[in-house]
């Protein structure tokens, strides 16, 4: 749609009807691209493709959910304090998942962007009671995407609250890991081992995958040890897969004699 047509429509229609016309126009435009998330991101003007290069990774991991009746919960509607700006990715997800229900949360009132299969809550991503209430209302999501404040402390806190509430078999995604290096967001470019950055927090979680190998008699696995099955790092993007992480170690790891024998063999 050219800017001229857009301006004219905006002038003659009220915001509700303008939104309706835009929705119909974009759904028609996107008909040939139901499987192509990069194209859908461009059509719906989501910054997940073009500004970032996230949708190619989303395609890889989300394809299996394409025709399922999934619940996707994305933190951050977009547009910050502007009530009429945002929701681009939510509309893209709705188009990509024809049977999916899309939920979102923003610190600002974004209710204007609600439509069939898109429900939006208002509140902060670090407000535990808000998050619990949302999950109580919508049920366990299959997919959670954190594209909210990007403040390191917030991302970690939100993950600690929400990952246990994600469905087994589900995927938790964190976007914009560049903020892990930016001091304004609590990041650090100097000390790459700074334990308060999100990159370090999620790097640290990779040890959960191998907790059965810890030589720690009596070690009690944490919930993350038991439920994180895989972590995939991309440029500024992390996917964390939830499942049952109970594969046994091939060694009787808490028997030092066996470890010693293994060392001698090597
Ligand atoms: C990068 S934008 C989201 C873009 C959107 N996910 C998309 O792909 O189109 C970030 C949004 O997070 C919201 N936000 C900022 N701090 C927040 C917080 N503490 N809790 C919830 N939302 C927050 C902002 O208002 C903003 O609309």
Image (cartoon, helix red, strand yellow):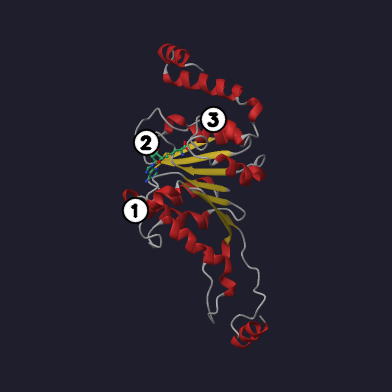
Q: Earlier in the sequence, mark 2 or mark 3?
A: 3
Mark 1: is the Cβ under 8 angstroms from ligand 1? no
Q: Is mark 3 within 8 Å of ligand 1?
A: no
Task: Check disc 1 and report the residue beneath it.
Answer: 186
Residue at image location 37% in from the left, 36% down from the top? 80
- Which residue: 53% across, 42% down? 54
Q: Position of residue 91 (x, y in %)?
A: 53, 32
Q: Which residue is mark 3?
A: 42
* Residue 80 badge: 2
Q: Nearer the viewer, mark 2 or mark 3?
A: 3
**Residues at marks 2 and 1, CA–CA distance in whole angstroms:** 20 Å
Q: Pinpoint residue 158: horizontal percent, then vertical percent.
A: 43, 53
Between 179 and 83, the one lying in front of the other is 179
Residue 127 visible to an observer of this rendering:
no
Give the quadrant of residue 264.
Answer: bottom right
For numbered disc 2, what is the local secondary structure?
loop
Q: Counting residues from the N terminus, which is met first, the one under dot 1 or under dot 3?
A: 3
Q: Is mark 2 within 8 Å of ligand 1?
A: yes
Left or right of residue 131, residue 245 in this image: right
Residue for point 50% across, 30% down: 45
Asked which secondary structure carries label 3, the reply is helix
In the image, residue 20 above or below residue 215 = above
């Amino acid at each position: 749609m050219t800017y001229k047509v857009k301006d004219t429509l905006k002038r003659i229609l009220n915001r509700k009807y303008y939104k309706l016309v835009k929705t119909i126009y974009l759904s028609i435009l996107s008909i040939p691209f139901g499987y192509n998330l990069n194209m859908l991101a461009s059509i719906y003007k989501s910054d997940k493709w073009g500004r970032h290069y996230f949708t190619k990774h989303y395609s890889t991991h989300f394809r299996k959910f394409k025709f399922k009746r999934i619940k996707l919960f994305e933190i951050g509607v977009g547009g910050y304090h502007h009530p009429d700006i945002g929701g681009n990715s939510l509309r893209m997800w709705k188009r990509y998942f024809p049977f999916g229900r899309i939920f979102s949360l923003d610190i600002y009132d974004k209710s204007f962007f609600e439509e069939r299969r898109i429900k939006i809550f208002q509140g902060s991503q670090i407000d535990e009671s808000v998050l619990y209430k949302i999950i109580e209302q919508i049920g366990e999501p299959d997919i959670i995407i954190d594209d909210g404040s990007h403040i390191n402390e917030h991302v970690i806190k939100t993950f600690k609250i929400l990952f246990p509430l994600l469905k087994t078999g589900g995927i938790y995604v964190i976007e914009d890991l560049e903020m892990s290096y930016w001091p304004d967001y609590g990041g650090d470019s100097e000390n790459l081992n700074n334990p308060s950055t999100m990159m370090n927090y999620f790097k640290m979680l990779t040890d959960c995958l191998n907790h059965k190998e810890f030589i720690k008699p009596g070690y009690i696995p944490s919930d993350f040890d038991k439920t994180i099955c895989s972590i995939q790092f991309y440029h500024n993007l992390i996917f964390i897969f939830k499942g049952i992480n109970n594969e046994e170690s091939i060694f009787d790891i808490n028997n030092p004699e066996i470890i010693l024998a293994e060392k001698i063999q090597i």
